[in-house]
Each structure stands twice: as C-alpha cells, then as structure tokens.
Image: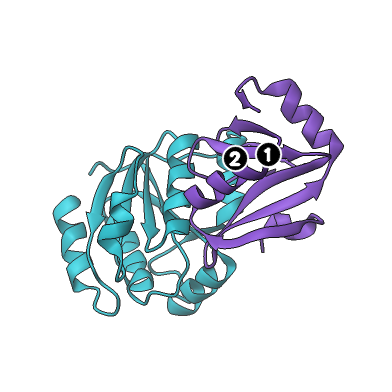
Chain colours: A purple, B cyan
Amino acid sequence: MSCFDNIKHEVLLESVSFREARKFIEEISDEVYYVKPGYKIFGDCYLVGVPPIALGIKGIDLIFPIVKPRLGTFVGKARNEKEIERLRENNASISE
Amino acid sequence: MDGNKSALLMMGCPEVPVQMGIVLYLSNKLGKAGYDVTVAGTDAALKLLKVSDPDEHYVKKTMEIDQCIADIVEKKIDFDCCFAFMHSDAGMTYAATMSAISKAKMYAVIFGNNAEDVAETIEFPAEKIVAKAVHNPIPLKNKIDRAIP
C-alpha cells in the first residue's frame, strides 16, 4: 500500500512511464518545480522518481507523480495550500 | 566481493517468475560471501519470499520497499551495494530513486520480455546485468555469476 493511498487525491493519468508522467505534469501545470527523489510531501510520503521529479501547481492544486511497482506511474492532484507554499519557498528551479 | 559489507536486494513487482528464484539465489551467494543481506519489496513480493523461504535459510532481513526508501532518506540506514531488480519502467524508476538517495554501488538486474528496452532507459550509474528471462532463471543466473564471481 502506497502512503498516497491515505491522501485524498484525484487521479489525472494512470499506468504510464515516469517520463510520460513528467511531461504531462509540465504541460498541464501553471508552475513547475523540480525536486530530488526522496522529497517529502504530505507529511510522510517520500517521492519516487527519475530525477528531476516535476511537481506542478495549477490554481490551488498540487500535481505530483505516484509510482506503483505493479501498475506504473500515476499522476495525482490534491488540494494542499501548505505543500504548495513549502514548494514555492524551498525551490528555485521554476518554469512558468 | 568483500565480506563484512551490507547488500540490499530491491525487488520489483513479483509478476515475472524468475525474480523470486534469483533473489533467493543471490541472497544465498552474497550471504556466503559474508554480506549482511536485506531484501526489500512490496507487500506481495515479501509474502512470496516468506512462503518460499519459511525458515529464513536464504533471507534473514526484509523491509517494505517504501519504508526502506524513507529510512535511507532519513539516514537511518544505508548499504554498500544495491541490486535493483526490474522488468518495467516502474522498477527502473525505483532503482533511479535508490541511485539518487543512497551511497550504495548500484547493480541493475534486468529481466523479462522487454529486458533490453528497459536497460536502455537507465541513465543512472549502474552495472547492468541483463537477460531476457521470464520462466527460466538460468540465463540471468549465469549473468549474475559472471558479474559477481
């Protein structure tokens, strides 16, 4: 069970490659930040991914990849202003 | 390989049959060489392992894969070498994560019908052990024996 199962989120894309998920996040987001594998979000979730991992912001939603060993990579969307602010404060690598 | 070192065997999704046999084989081989071996995997993969080796002859330590990543990020544990098993993009992605967060020397153990395609997507530093093996573990075993005499 993934820790993301405990986070209320909407699935935007499912069972794609990690690179496809990154491209999707870059295309649909208003802002994109790049973090390293192991970046901690939602308290106790550690991001799995091929660096650089793209995290997107669209309005008040955070858009993020979820890697499932059996099913491939999913893209999730969750409303979390605290995580969005933390991402903006801590990351300089940005494309808008 | 030298003894008194630690090794992580990171399993991917257990749907390809050769994985479990090779994990047990490699754990035994590394254990005999003096390695302290830990096997990480999904809940399903660890259940398969425990049913296959109920008396822990071959594998003494196991960890849930996401907990393993969390503990390495938090610097609670790390390993001298990591054998990342993969037959899909998801397995490769977990291995890339391990390469980024751990100081371990990486070995990418790649198998399944698309082994060569998966191997081509690897961009992180790793010794690749590749065999198009699904049911018959011998081609992969032979490659492992060549890589780790």
Report whether A71 appears left or right of A6: left
Q: Earlier in the sequence, mark 1 or mark 2?
A: 2
Residue B80, quarter of the rendered image: top left
Q: Which residue is mark 1?
A: A56
Q: Which residue shows up at 50% across the image and 51% down it?
A: A20
Q: Which mark is residue A28?
A: none
Report whether B143 appears left or right of B59: left
**Label 2 marks which chain's residue?**
A
Q: Could you tell me if residue B149 is visible in this image?
A: no
Q: Is residue B111 above or below residue B105?
A: below
Q: Which residue shows up at 74% across the image and 60% down it?
A: A5
Q: Are marks 1 and 2 on the same chain?
A: yes
Q: Could you tell me if residue A30 is visible in this image?
A: yes
The residue nearer to you, when weighing B125 against A84, is A84
Residue B42, quarter of the rendered image: bottom right
Q: Amino acid at mark 2?
A: Glu
Q: Residues within 10 Å of mark 1 (few under 14, many from 20)?
A: many
Q: Which residue is mark 2?
A: A26
Q: Position of residue A76 (x, y in %)?
A: 70, 53
Where disc 2 sits, the SS reads helix
Q: Amino acid at mark 1?
A: Gly
Q: Position of residue A66 (x, y in %)?
A: 62, 53
Q: Are marks 1 and 2 in contact (CB under 8 Å)?
A: yes
**Label 1 marks which chain's residue?**
A
Q: Residues within 10 Å of mark 2 (few under 14, many from 20)?
A: many
Q: Which residue shows up at 23% across the image and 68% down it?
A: B132
Q: Mark 1 to mark 2: distance in Å?
A: 7 Å
Where disc 1 sits, the SS reads strand
Q: Position of residue A15 (x, y in %)?
A: 55, 64
